[in-house]
Structures are given as structure tokens and as C-alpha cells.
Amino acid sequence: MSEQQANNPLHGVTLEQIVNSLVEYYGWDELGIRINIRCFNSDPSVKSSLKFLRRTPWARKKVERLYIAMQKDKD
């Protein structure tokens, strides 16, 4: 089982850490362009984004995919 987690780039990373990293890397404007959801485009905040992403699986999946792509770009 630990072998599976070693291959999981999201293991040990909270959703809040993901959102903060994306905002730091892209900024709210670029993030809203890359993932067109209201919580990134209309009066964005980490708190409102987390609330929306925790109850919207399709949006969370997009955010997680963008985070993984960002991590690969950084390397």
C-alpha cells in the first residue's frame, strides 16, 4: 500500500495547499482562465474556493490535475 502512495503526487497534500500553490504560481486571473469556475473569477478567495471544491468533485479533479501539471513544469 505504501508503494501506491509513493506514486501518488497528491499524497500528503491538502486541498488548501493545492489552492494556495496554484494561486501563488498562476495568480487568480490566470487560474480563472485555466479553470473557468466562478470561485476563481468572481471575488476569489481561498476560503470560498475550498468550500466549492470540497463539494464539487469535477472541479476538484480539474484543480488537482492542474496542480500535478504545475509540479511537473516546476521540475
Image (spheres, rainbow, N blue to C red):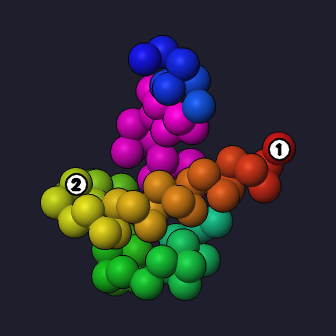
Q: Disc 1 marks which residue? A: 75
Above or below: residue 19 compared with residue 29: above
Identify which amino acid the numbered label 1 is placed on: Asp
Magenta stretch?
A: 8-23
Residue in the foreground of this view, choosing between 44 and 60: 60
Q: Amino acid at mark 2?
A: Arg
**Mark 1 and 2 residues: CB-CB less than 8 Å, in contact?**
no
**Image location of residue 40, percent across then percent down:** 40, 74
Tell me the crowding category of disc 1: few under 14, some 14 to 19, or many 20 or more residues within 10 angstroms, Cα based: few
Residue 70 counted in the magenta span: no
The disc, 1 or 2, on the residue closer to the chain's N-terminal end is 2
* Secondary structure at numbered mark 1: loop
Q: Position of residue 17 (x, y in %)?
A: 46, 41
The residue drawn where x is 48% and y is 77% is 35
Is residue 44 found left or right of 53 in the rendered image? right
What residue sits right under mark 2 in the picture?
Answer: 54
Residue drawn at (22%, 54%) of the image: 54
Q: Is residue 75 left or right of residue 18?
A: right
Between 51 and 75, the residue placed more toward the observer is 75
Q: CA distance from mark 1 to mark 2?
A: 28 Å
